[in-house]
Amino acid sequence: MKTRWSGCGTALVTPFTETGDLDEAAIGRLAKRQIDGGVHFLVPCGTTGESPTLSHTEKLRVVELVAAEAAGKVPVLAGAGGNNTTAVAALAKEMVLAGADGILSVTPYYNKPSPEGLYRHFCTVAESVDCSIVVYNVPGRTGTNITPEVLTRLASVSNIVGVKEASGDFEQMCQVCRDTTDNFSVLSGDDAYTLAMVAMGAVGVISVASNEVPSEMAELVDAALAGDFLAARAKHERLFPLMQINFVESNPIPVKAALAKMGLMSAHYRLPLVVPQEPSSRRIAEVLRDLGLLNGVPRKTPSDGPVSSET
């Protein structure tokens, strides 16, 4: 039950058609591109996948499509979160039936539970499924922080096996890495912090940037986990502008715009998300151009090793 989630997992975008439906063909293509690019696991139906606007049926369909493409080549960690514990537990069960190998579950938002409420919420979700659970701590979006003390309690639950840590608090990240066991996976929830977090003891990232550059993000994490921090730092420095531009507006607005500029999908959003403002769009294009991504071949820098096409 203690599945070891590590490496680079991609927080997949959800492509829509012009009429607002799921673009099922594009979902499959993008998942295949990630697998071919060497990422270690796939994460559909998270924030980057616009999960708040997906219907219950659509979430299950996205997981089915991604799991079918993964076909055992890489595991699928499906997003099942919310602030109604009973509904989250039920959704988690159905996502496992749809093909998920594990569940990523975000902190309940808006109702701001107490530490005991958080603990009992995640325990209830964990009890509902026979698979691994990774909790997702992102207080900037949810309004509630999972403290290291609560996380240490959760780590003792048999199938709560990791955390996507996006608190932005380095002291907290250090404490989480120190206080949890070797069987508990600490994953960065921010691309820009991945290198530093691996140095502190984290074992990977759930990445937005790997939507655009799966091979390079996987290589960055592989190098860091192997202790080759010189190579990892060179890759981090090259990709840092992309990591930044992906948050020039609310995620996933910029990354979907970038993928559209790269010719990989059409950039359609569901309200309340809308297309990026023109200054943001220009900045996204500039970063992609500087990285050589508009023609599908990342530009090689002197500090890089061989670079293969990301398309």
Image: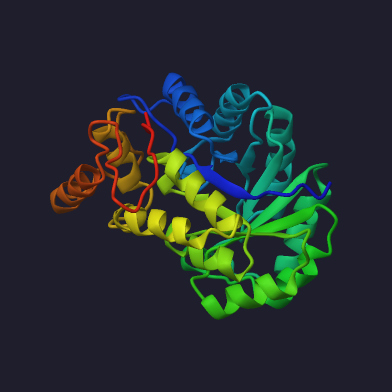
* Residue visible at 44% across and 35% down in the picture: 14
Left or right of 105? Residue 193 is left
Residue 208 vertical position relative to residue 117 in the rendered view, above or below:
above
Residue 217: image x %, image y %? Answer: 46, 47
* Residue visible at 54% across and 57% down in the picture: 224
In the picture as drawn, the residue positioned furthest to the top comes out as: 25
Residue 269: image x %, image y %? Answer: 33, 38
Residue 85, can we see it? yes
Residue 223 vertical position relative to residue 196 in the rendered view, above or below:
above
Residue 149: image x %, image y %? Answer: 72, 77
Residue 200 vertical position relative to residue 47 in the rendered view, above or below:
below
Which quarter of the rendering shows the C terminus?
top left
Residue 243, can we see it? no
- Of 91 and 178, which appears nearest the observer? 178
Left or right of 28? Residue 244 is left
* Residue visible at 75% across and 51% down in the picture: 125
Residue 150 vertical position relative to residue 14 in the rendered view, above or below:
below
